[in-house]
């Protein structure tokens, strides 16, 4: 089985889908990796490293695409200037694995395009979030890095120690962090900030996260709101009532007056991120405060991908895509992909098993048919 990796065309994407050590791991499964020369350079993964791990380096994206059976990417396929055409159009009778956003309009357009060109599409962002698929869960691995990184970004902007200090030049209290949303990214942020010595408090609509927050050294804030549960039957966050959001924002207004840093990660699958930090919250913070908006919309004043200062508060518009820590994020993504091939292959051949809920769940297009979303019986 021949698997390829090419340079990502999106200038904002600096990671690579398979790192050199992943090529060696895949060889053990009977998979030969072909890499476009220079594709991993931004993550410090050089051609010589790929070659010494058994990969074959080819000089162009065209050569890779013409050679392989399966292409693995990070970003959804797009028009590729070197190819002079859309990546999907160049992949007839091959398989593409990447983020695809199958629930979005763009994702639906891609699926139609793949049908037209006889391309199989597997979406890494549709891998079911079940225990058996944890080792392939790119959403979790990338969120883990993003949560860690958010704390480092905040600490870099913060004009004081995170930890408490008693020195001959004065004693200083630990900084106070509020983490909104205790999913994978939020828990990573709580753990990192606690390890830096900050005092961390956190809030999530899903009460089951309380124990996880506390096990990482955080203090879980409780909102007195009857029995309204923040999780749906599958354990995912749901949209809350207006009255709930009102109370939640009142809680955050109180918190904003006390904390030095707010990291927001609150998201609801398939919905825009709820706006929970309004201008009045930002204005209530002490000068020198920092907000990192990882959900890309939890703070009303966030400017996407920008860092700027509003009334003495630094607001960092971030997201889960980790355009820093490329080595770490690429290595974790690549490990997820290696584990995915462990499920996708049998006897050294591609074995697309429609009865496997993980494989079926991530399949968008197969043999000319749009198969997303999967039937409900496969998602239970
Ligand atoms: P996410 O990025 O979709 O959301 C982040 C967090 O924001 C969630 O914990 C959510 O409850 C919270 N949130 C939503 N609205 C909020 C609000 N108004 N105020 C405060 N918090 C709010 O979450 P995620 O990290 O991708 O995890 C989503 C789900 O998937 C969770 O149930 C998690 O346990 C589950 N999960 C399962 C696996 C697995 O078993 N393979 C792996 C990872 C995550």
Image: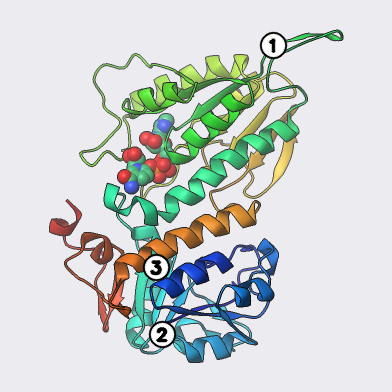
**Badge nearest the viewer, 2 or 3:** 2
The residue lying furthest to the left in this view is 377
- Which image quarter: residue 154? top right
- Mark 1 packing: few (<14 Cα in 10 Å), some, or many (20+)? some
Disc 1 secondary structure class: loop
Location of residue 166 with respect to 373 vertically, above or below: above
Residue 145, position in %: x, y?
Answer: 55, 46
Q: Earlier in the sequence, mark 1 or mark 3?
A: 3
Report the residue marked by disc 2.
69
Task: Find the distance from the CA under tag 2 to the CA under tag 3.
Answer: 22 Å
Q: Quadrant of ligand 1?
A: top left
Q: What's the mark number on residue 173?
A: 1
Q: Is residue 9 left or right of residue 365?
A: right
- Mark 2 packing: few (<14 Cα in 10 Å), some, or many (20+)? some
- State the residue at coordinates (30%, 66%): 343
Task: Find the distance from the CA under tag 1 to the CA under tag 3.
Answer: 48 Å
Q: Is residue 351 left or right of residue 297?
A: left
- State the residue at coordinates (66%, 21%): 260
Residue 246, position in %: x, y?
Answer: 41, 23
Report the residue marked by disc 3.
107
Task: Find the distance from the CA under tag 1 to the CA under tag 2.
Answer: 58 Å
**Badge nearest the viewer, 1 or 3:** 1
- State the residue at coordinates (26%, 60%): 358
Q: Nearer the viewer, residue 254 or 328?
A: 328
Disc 3 secondary structure class: helix
Q: Earlier in the sequence, mark 2 or mark 3?
A: 2
**Badge nearest the viewer, 1 or 2:** 2
């Amino acid at each position: 089985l021949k698997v390829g990796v090419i340079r990502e065309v999106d200038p904002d994407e600096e990671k690579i889908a398979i790192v050199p050590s992943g090529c060696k791991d895949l060889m053990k499964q009977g998979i030969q990796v072909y890499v476009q020369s220079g594709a991993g350079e931004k993550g410090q993964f050089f051609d010589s490293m790929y070659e010494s791990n058994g990969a074959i380096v080819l000089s162009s994206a065209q050569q890779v695409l013409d050679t392989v059976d399966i292409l693995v990417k990070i970003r959804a396929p797009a028009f590729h200037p070197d190819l002079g055409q859309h990546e999907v159009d160049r992949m007839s009778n091959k398989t593409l694995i990447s983020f695809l956003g199958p629930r979005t309009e763009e994702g639906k357009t891609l699926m139609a395009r793949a049908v037209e060109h006889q391309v199989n599409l597997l979406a890494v962002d549709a891998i079911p979030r079940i225990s058996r698929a944890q080792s392939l869960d790119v959403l979790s691995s990338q969120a883990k890095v993003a949560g860690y990184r958010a704390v480092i970004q905040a600490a870099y902007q913060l004009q004081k120690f995170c930890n408490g200090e008693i020195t001959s030049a004065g004693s200083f209290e630990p900084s106070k962090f509020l983490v909104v949303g205790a999913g994978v990214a939020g828990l990573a942020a709580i753990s990192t900030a606690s390890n830096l010595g900050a005092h961390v408090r956190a809030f999530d609509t899903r009460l089951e996260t309380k124990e996880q927050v506390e096990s990482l050294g955080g203090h879980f804030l409780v909102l007195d709101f009857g029995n309204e549960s923040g999780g749906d039957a599958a354990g995912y966050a749901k949209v809350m009532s207006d009255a709930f959001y009102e109370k939640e924002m009142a809680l955050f207004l109180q918190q904003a007056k006390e904390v030095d840093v707010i990291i927001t990660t609150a998201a609801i699958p398939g919905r825009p991120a709820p706006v929970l930090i309004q201008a009045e919250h930002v204005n209530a913070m002490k000068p020198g405060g920092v907000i990192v908006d990882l959900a890309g919309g939890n703070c009303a004043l966030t400017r996407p991908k920008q860092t700027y200062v509003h009334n003495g508060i630094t607001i960092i518009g971030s997201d889960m895509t980790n355009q820093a820590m490329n080595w770490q994020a690429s290595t974790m993504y690549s490990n997820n992909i290696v584990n995915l091939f462990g499920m996708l292959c049998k006897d050294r051949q591609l074995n697309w098993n429609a009865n496997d809920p993980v494989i079926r769940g991530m399949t968008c297009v197969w043999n000319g048919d749009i198969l997303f979303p999967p039937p409900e019986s496969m998602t239970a």
